[in-house]
Image (spheres, rainbow, N blue to C red):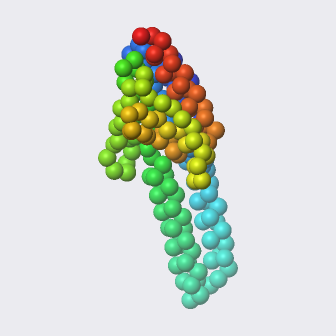
Amino acid sequence: MKSERTTGIERSSGAQPGVQRFVLWPNRSLPYRGKIILLAVIATGLAIPILFVNGAMIWYLTVPAGLTFLGMLLALWSNERAANFQEIVEISQGVMRIRRVGIRGPDIEVRFNPYWAKLSLKTDRYVENRLLISESGQSYSVGEFLAPEEREVLSEFLADSMSQGLSRR
């Protein structure tokens, strides 16, 4: 199983001969260790003023500092949870299958015939290099969470795989 990996895209030839598989995932610019360091810096910054206050005034700083820290924990957890999904694109001779697997709602699966499917990169007012796969009035936007440059690379990968699949017929 040959595998090639770029940021947010993993390209591999599937376990079955003639199947190309692409796994797409959102970028995570802050790794787990970075989150721990960020939380430690925030906790330290919130604790320093509390150390210099004594008496009843300590509660006026401790409660807001604690709520601020809990808010940061909640924000980091929510961000990690929202980015916990992936799109899987599989191309074989007869079918191009796109599955979006994640925690938000049901999994989505769309199928196209690679012979008739059309790839297009479009730029509109909101999204640069939107990668659309369309066939017979049905279209699907692939890799919406990728950077515009990554969608361009993905488009080249998919076009190459589709043309290889067609030439094997």
Residue in the picture at 42% in, 15% down: 18
User: Farthest residue in the bottom direction?
Assistant: 56
Using the rendered view, name the quadrant where residue 41 is placed.
Answer: bottom right
Identify whether 46 is placed above or below 2: below
Residue in the picture at 57% in, 41% down: 122
Q: Is residue 94 left or right of residue 130?
A: left
The image position of residue 55, as x and y in percent, is 59, 88
Q: Nearer the viewer, residue 60 or 81?
A: 81
Residue in the picture at 64% in, 38% down: 149
Q: Is residue 134 left or right of residue 26?
A: left
The image position of residue 51, as x and y in percent, is 65, 76
Using the rendered view, name the quadrant where residue 5 is placed.
Answer: top right
Q: Nearer the viewer, residue 92 or 122?
A: 122
User: Farthest residue in the left direction?
Assistant: 106
State whether residue 3 appears in this view: no
Count of residue discs: 0
| Image quarter in which the C terminus is found | top left
State whether residue 38 appears in this view: yes
Identify whether 57 is placed above or below 75: below
Q: Nearer the viewer, residue 20 or 2?
A: 20
